[in-house]
Image: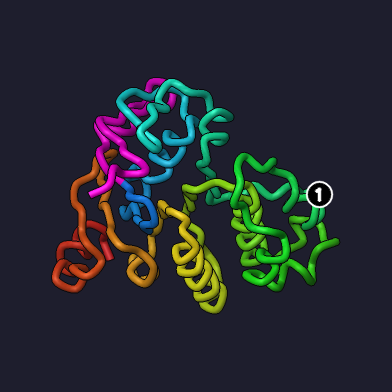
Amino acid sequence: MAEPMLSVKGLNAWYGESHILHGVDFDVRQGEVVTLLGRNGAGKTTTMKSIMGLVGRRSGSILFEAGETIGLPAYKIARLGIAFCPEERGIFASLDVAENLMLPPAIGEGGMTVETIFELFPNLRERLSSQGTKLSGGEQQMLAIGRILRTGARLLLLDEPTEGLAPVIVQQIGHTIHRLKKEGFTILLVEQNFRFAATVADRHYVMEHGRIVDEIANDALAANMEKLHEYLGV
């Protein structure tokens, strides 16, 4: 089996004096869609921010394409080919859709063209001159994802991409993730909605109290449903 694209070992992270992650271990192989599942406060978002170098202090090992990144600042991690789409989306209110879309620099070859992004998200073409924050929640999420697809990043970190969105938009996000996988992108996805996660992911890691406590293959979800309900409190 090939080396993982992303390998996280013994990851600890702190916000100030608060110790949030306690020895997190997981792998993501090239071309996979992998989810981090867990209740609020389990450490899922902190794990993503730690991968990107966006927490105050971290220790352990984070290998991306076999290179150690734990000591690198966030801008160098991004230039390696990792892109983060945060839950809050980070749309700039003073910029219109076109300006928001073109804001991040390309960090490698293979980024999607603007035309391809419009094929994925036709709403954006129609709203090009609208201010970013005048968009609906669903359109803002499309813009946030579209923006990182331009950059040439090969590993996409998507934090709660379906949170608070209408079912029709959730379905569109699902179709987009399937297409990205077919085109060779590797995706790490944080999700509260495991029913959505089950439609897009290959494997799931379950987090509790800043640790990975289980790994479940997508085709084994049905057999583990009782355990999953217990983990997630649903």
* Count of all numbered marks drawn on residues in the image: 1
Residue numbers of the magenta segment: 1-27
Residue 224 pos. (x, y %): 16, 66
Q: In this view, does 165 lie to the left or right of 207?
A: right
Hey, which residue is sitting farthest right in the picture?
Answer: 129
Amino acid on which disc 1 is placed: Leu
Quarter holding residue 194? bottom left
Q: 156 or 206, which lies in front?
A: 156
Residue 42 pos. (x, y %): 32, 45
**Could you tell me what secondary structure mostly forms the magenta stretch?**
strand
Q: Does the magenta stretch include residue 58?
A: no
Q: 38 or 3, which lies in front?
A: 3
Q: In this view, does 116 lie to the left or right of 12?
A: right
The structure residue drawn at horizontal position 28% and vertical position 57%, both measured from the top left corner, is 204
Q: Residues within 10 Å of mark 1 (few under 14, many from 20)?
A: some
Q: Does the magenta stretch include residue 6?
A: yes
Residue 208 pos. (x, y %): 25, 46
Hey, which residue is sitting farthest bottom in the picture?
Answer: 168
Residue 109 pos. (x, y %): 61, 46
Q: In this view, does 208 lie to the left or right of 165?
A: left
Q: 218 or 40, which lies in front?
A: 218
The structure residue drawn at horizontal position 50% and vertical position 63%, both measured from the top left corner, is 183
The structure residue drawn at horizontal position 81% and vertical position 57%, both measured from the top left corner, is 131
The structure residue drawn at horizontal position 31% and vertical position 38%, both measured from the top left corner, is 7
Q: What residue is disc 1 on?
A: 95
Q: In this view, does 90 lie to the left or right of 153?
A: right
Quarter holding residue 19? top left
Q: 152 or 132, which lies in front?
A: 152
Quarter holding residue 37? bottom left
Position above or below: 25 against 120: above
Q: In which quarter of the image is the C terminus?
A: bottom left
Give the secondary structure at mark 1. loop
